[in-house]
Image (cartoon, rainbow, N blue to C red):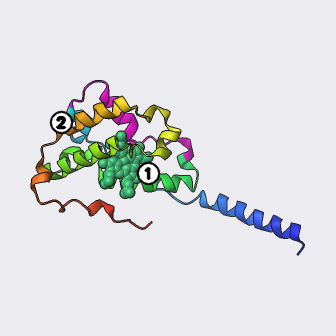
Amino acid sequence: MKKRNRLRTIFLILLLLLVAIQFLPVDRSTPALTPAQDFLAVMNSPGQLGPLIKDGCYDCHSHETEYPWYSYVAPVGQWLQGHIRKARKQVNFSVWTTYSTEDADHALKEIVEVVKEKEMPLKSFTWMHPEARLTDVQRTELATWFQGLRTGASDNNAEGNSDDEGNEEEGE
Ligand code: HEC
């Protein structure tokens, strides 16, 4: 085969693969929402903080994900859904009241950390969602408020029980 023909064949195969993976299913289903279990519904956040949490965290850490158009394009959709699955496993605001006192306190502790350390929302998220970018002042306000919700329940109990469960990498 001539070099040009070979390149054309490779290109066509790649194109076909790209088209083919568009038909791979992505599970975007969620259980029905139970407002009485929702973090923001029960927590009475100060006016300006609720929207920050909703815009900044709920797309991944709740069952109220708003899927952008590019989440329907493979392999981006698979990549995003992976984030969402992992995020919900760590903290799911939609089922907040089902957490034990320890788990809730532990989650709050981690939340304070990731907000202060600017680990969340993920950079890849704020890149496409400018409304979710937090200023330093907003981060301080959020961290202070979350910190105030803590009961300390996860400190007393010898650390560890619920500590590492979320870190296991799950396969596809
Ligand atoms: C684009 C999706 C996305 C958004 C938006 C997002 N997170 Fe996350 N978050 C993740 C993923 C994915 C993980 C799991 C990371 C891992 O397992 O390595 C995670 C983990 C966490 C953890 C656990 C961290 C740890 O070290 O165990 C906390 C707490 C957290 N996020 C809080 C938040 C808060 C608060 C917001 C909003 C300010 C937020 N996240 C926004 C995707 C997101």
Picture disc at residue 126:
none
Q: Residue furthest top?
A: 47
Horizontal and vertical percent position of residue 98: 19, 49
Q: Write the residue at 49% across / 56% down.
A: 26
The answer to whether marks 1 and 2 mark residues whose Cβ atoms lie closer than 8 Å is: no
- Image-based side of 123 in relation to 145, left or right: right
Q: Which span is picked out in magenta?
A: 44-70
Horizontal and vertical percent position of residue 157: 10, 57
Horizontal and vertical percent position of residue 76: 55, 53
Q: Callout 1: helix, strand or loop?
A: loop
Q: Write the residue at 39% across / 46% down.
A: 119
Q: Quadrant of the N terminus?
A: bottom right
**Which quarter of the figure has residue 17?**
bottom right
Q: Is residue 61 visible?
A: no
User: In this orientation, which residue lies closer to the viewer: 104 or 17?
Assistant: 104
Q: Amino acid at mark 2?
A: Gly
Mark 1 or mark 2: name the one nearer the start of the chain: 1
Horizontal and vertical percent position of residue 140: 30, 33
Q: Is residue 156 above or below residue 12?
A: above
The residue singled out by tag 2 in the image is 148
User: In this orientation, which residue lies closer to the viewer: 157 or 97?
Assistant: 157
Residue 50 highlighted magenta (yes or no): yes
Q: Write the residue at 80% across / 67% down.
A: 9
